[in-house]
Image: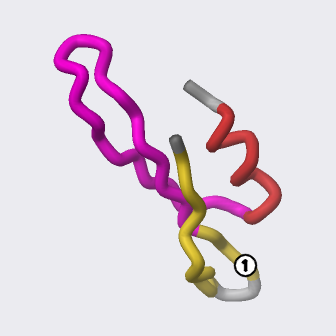
Amino acid sequence: MAKKTVATLQGGSKKLTKAIKMVKSPKTGAYTFVEAVMAPELVDEFLKQK
């Protein structure tokens, strides 16, 4: 389960996007959120990672 944030961040001349995904902990079964700021082209790869 993952979602993209709607807001895009401007950093100088580069356009950056903040992606957030939910990751289930194998130990406790609880969900945590992992956030990363990256180029828009890399968001799909980030969301596909486990």
Question: Is 38 covered by the magenta stretch?
Answer: yes
Q: Residues within 10 Å of mark 1 (few under 14, many from 20)?
A: few
User: In this view of the protein, which residue sits in the foreground, 14 or 48?
Assistant: 48
Residue type for callout 1: Lys
Quadrant of image for the C terminus: top right
The location of residue 1, given as percent across then percent down, is: 52, 41
- Is 15 placed left or right of 41 in the picture? left
Question: For residue 29, what is the image quadrant?
Answer: top left
Can you give x and y, in whole percent of width and height, for residue 19 in the image? 55, 59
- x 22%, y 12%: residue: 27
Q: Position of residue 15 (x, y in %)?
A: 72, 78
- Image: 15 above or below 48: below
Seen in the image, is 17 located left or right of residue 32? right
Q: Element under label 1?
A: strand
Name the residue carrying label 1.
15
Residue extent of the magenta highlight: 18-39
Q: What residue lies at 35% left-to-right and 28% top-to-bottom? A: 24
Look at the magenta stretch and give its main secondary structure.
strand
Name the residue located 22 percent from the left edge and 30 percent from the top edge.
30
